[in-house]
Amino acid sequence: MKAVIFDWDGTLADTFHIALASFQKALADYSKDFTEDDLKKGFGGGVKGVIRLFLDEKGISHSESDIDAIAQRKTEIQSKMAKDVPILPGVRDLIAELKKHNCGLALCSSNHAGAIKPVLKHNDIDVFGVMVTADNFHGKLKPEPDMFLETAKKMSVSPAECYVFEDSPMGVRAGKDAEMHVIAVETGPFSKQDLEAEGPNVIFPSLEKTVNITDYIFS
């Protein structure tokens, strides 16, 4: 059996600007200066990693309990915006085709389930047999391979059987280091050159060319 593991933010859902607004609101008591670059710099480190890096770089005094509280607030804010998060073009068709091939489907994200599940439910695409998120994984997050390896373990498949979809260089690196087949998509805030630098097996502009993607996986 072939298994397909999807990243969430920027791969299945266009969350960047919703996430940015959520971080800005959650951090408002500490700083009004959280920008797109601050979000991109923290990619892969999870919500708490983004917050910690921003506060450290700004020299803003904080405790770990402060970070926990800000992260919880950010997730609560974003979960209430589920109806405003668009699923990216091609996602529904690709999932339907993969299900026809009896692929195992999983979602692996450094984000929190509270920001993901409401969007899946709202869009009726809650089809993943396994979900590994920052809530149920306590090892090293992307760009380390640990999250992907844990996902494969939960799916009862070997890494070599897994096809990973990622939109960020950190995610591509994690998938490659897990020795999985990595399909990069240019649907997030990173350039094709950024993705190429990490050596994915293939790059697609988006998930819209479903036939090309499934041909690649099943050829």
Image: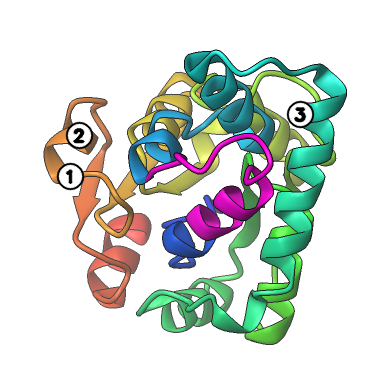
Name the residue: 65% across, 55% down: 106
- Look at the image and say whether residue 29 sits in the magenta stretch: yes
Q: Position of residue 171 (x, y in %)?
A: 44, 35
Question: In front here: 3 or 28?
Answer: 28
> In the displayed structure, would residue 39 be above or below residue 143?
below
Name the residue type under label 1: Ser
Q: Name the residue under label 2.
A: 194
Name the image quarter holding residue 148.
top right
Q: Mark 3 points at which residue?
A: 67
Cα distance between the residues tagged 2 and 3:
29 Å
Q: In which quarter of the image is the C terminus?
A: bottom left
Cα distance between the residues tagged 1 and 2:
5 Å
Judge from the rendering whether residue 102 lies leftward or rightward of residue 11; answer left or right. Answer: right
Foreground mark, 2 or 3, reads 3
Name the residue type under label 2: Asp
Q: How many neighbours does mark 2 have within 10 angstroms: few (below 14), some (14-19), or many (20 or more)?
A: some
Q: How many neighbours does mark 3 have within 10 angstroms: few (below 14), some (14-19), or many (20 or more)?
A: some
Name the residue: 18% across, 26% down: 197
Q: Mark 1 points at which residue?
A: 191
> In the displayed structure, would residue 155 be above or below residue 188?
above
Q: Where is residue 178 in the image (x, y as percent from the top left)?
A: 51, 23
User: Extreme left residue here?
Assistant: 193
Judge from the rendering whether residue 94 lies leftward or rightward of residue 193; answer left or right. Answer: right
